Image (tube, rainbow, N blue to C red):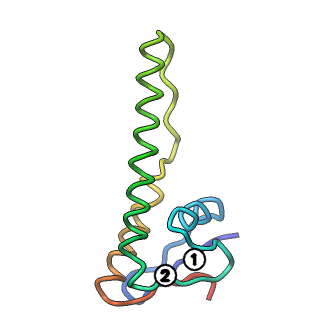
Amino acid sequence: MLYKFKSKAAGDLIMLEPNGRRVLEIIGKDPGPKGIIEPGQMPAAVAALESAIAREEADHQAAVDEARANGKAAPKAPDVSLRQRAVPFIDMLKRAEKAGADVVWGV
């Protein structure tokens, strides 16, 4: 399954199911086949995504520091980080909020 996010304020954004599901769960939305994010919900969604990105990066850095302190090889970072996956979605949310437009999927 693919998630295709749409808004009148931005171009369509397509995510594979696991990535779209994760982003929606982070912002507290049901990752069902259809949904809507209204402009009033967007600041909290952006904040939740930015917080999750910061946590992921801090957790990885802590794991690297711990490995180095123990003389072990540093763990590999994910091939594609949450930051890389979420930044286009954050941009869409910011544009949509500014325009007063909804972001929808599955419609």
For residue 39, which quarter of the picture?
Answer: bottom left
For residue 45, which quarter of the picture?
Answer: bottom left
Q: Quadrant of the N terminus?
A: bottom right
Q: Position of residue 17 (x, y in %)?
A: 65, 65
Residue depicted at x 56% and y 68%: 24
Which of 88 and 99 lies nearest the eye of the viewer? 99
> Is 11 drawn above or below residue 83 in the view shown?
below
Q: Position of residue 73 (x, y in %)?
A: 50, 17
Residue depicted at x 50% and y 47%: 80
Query: Which mark sits nearer the N-terminus, 2 or 1?
Result: 1
In the picture, the disc for residue 19 is none
Residue occupied by mark 1: 4
Residue occupied by mark 2: 37
* Disc 1 packing (10 Å; few <14; some 14–19; many ≥20): some
Where disc 1 sits, the SS reads strand
The three-letter code of the residue at mark 2 reads: Ile
The three-letter code of the residue at mark 1 reads: Lys
